[in-house]
Image: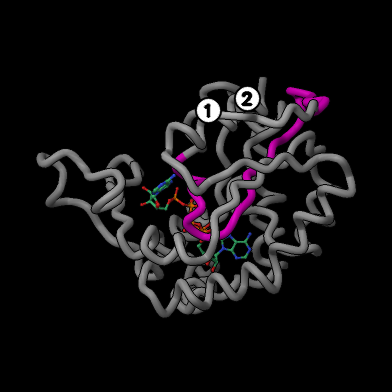
């Protein structure tokens, strides 16, 4: 594997952003980054799903956007992040997964926390739909599987669930939202010298190796 050597001044007391289209493998790669950096994962998607499962007002407000594959309004997301960043474990920076997703979110983040690195996992649209529609999650552990690319062990197969927004129609809307509202952020962070891109269209272990190379 040929890795172009680009050096980033990563301040390990600051936050890292994991960036990419739906199904790029952000959640899949997050565990190894958490282990390597000691930073807690802050996934806005997971936070919204937890709020929905708990039946909070915020969760119920977010539900219609999430199930349609649209972005939840910025003020809701920014409020969630402001609250999360007050917690003790965020003091040495966090790993943002799925946040920020719009320029206003990135501008708000710049006021809340320092970001030293944005890892962009690049995957073409034609690989995304199959990944998302085949994704299954373990509700007990949060582990992510795929019916073809990462089958779950037989003993847990019966309890796996499929996210409500993991259907072809919602994925197409999510991809449109990504291209219209989120992808401009790559240039925004590139201009700040913070963007590292990795090829997400290869085996999971090879994506992980590219991310390790960036972190090291
Ligand atoms: P969120 O939960 O963040 O979903 P997403 O960004 O659409 O990302 P995914 O979780 O679908 O994908 P992923 O990149 O984590 O991929 P994964 O590793 O699981 O957001 C959901 C919704 O919440 C949004 O649509 C929006 O409504 C709302 N929301 C959240 N944050 C928001 C924000 N900041 N602002 C506004 N709204 C917000 O992998 C996918 C599948 O592919 C898995 O099955 C996996 O096993 C497989 N896979 C992974 N890597 C590979 C590989 N290399 N090869 C083959 N298969 C692979």
Q: Residues within 10 Å of mark 2 (few under 14, many from 20)?
A: some
Quadrant of the image for the N terminus?
A: top right
Using residue 79 as the reference point, say whether residue 158 is left or right of it.
left
The picture places residue 90, in percent across and down from the top left corner, at: 67, 33
Query: Going by the picture, which residue comes out furthest to the right?
Result: 191
- Indicate which disc residue 213 carries: 2
Marks 2/1 in contact by CB < 8 Å: the verdict is yes
Q: Residue at x 58, y 25 (%)?
A: 212
Q: Which residue is mark 1?
A: 209
The part of the chain drawn in magenta is 8-28
- Label 1 CB sits under 8 Å from any ligand 1 atom: no
At numbered mark 1, what does the secondary structure look like: helix, strand or loop? helix
Can residue 149 be seen by looking at this rendering? yes
> What residue is rendered at 76% in x and 58% in y?
185
In the image, 211 versus 158, the foreground residue is 211
Q: Could you tell me residue 215's position as x and y percent?
A: 66, 25
* Label 1 environment density (alpha carbons within 10 Å; few <14, some 14–19, many ≥20): some
| Above or below, 214 relative to 171 | above
Instruction: Determine the residue positioned at 56% across, 38% down.
Output: 41
């Amino acid at each position: 594997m040929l890795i172009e050597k680009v050096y980033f001044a990563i301040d390990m007391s600051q936050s890292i952003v994991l960036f990419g289209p739906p199904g790029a493998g952000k959640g899949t790669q997050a565990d190894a980054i958490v282990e390597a950096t000691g930073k807690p994962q802050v996934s806005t998607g997971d936070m919204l799903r937890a709020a929905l499962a708990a039946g909070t007002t915020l969760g119920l407000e977010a539900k219609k956007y999430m199930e349609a594959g649209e972005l939840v309004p910025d003020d809701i997301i920014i409020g969630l992040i402001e609250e999360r960043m007050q917690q003790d474990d965020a003091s040495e920076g966090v790993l943002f997964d799925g946040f920020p997703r719009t320029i206003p979110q990135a501008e708000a983040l710049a006021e809340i926390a320092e970001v030293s690195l944005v890892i962009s996992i690049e995957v073409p649209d034609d690989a995304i739909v199959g990944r998302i529609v085949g994704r299954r999650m373990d509700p007990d552990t949060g582990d992510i599987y795929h019916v073809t690319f990462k089958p779950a062990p037989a003993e847990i197969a019966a309890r796996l669930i499929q996210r409500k927004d993991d259907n072809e129609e919602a994925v197409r809307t999510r991809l449109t939202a990504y291209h219209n509202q989120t992808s401009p952020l790559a240039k925004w962070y590139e201009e700040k010298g913070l963007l590292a891109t990795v090829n997400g269209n290869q085996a999971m272990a090879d994506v992980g190796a590219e991310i390790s190379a960036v972190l090291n």
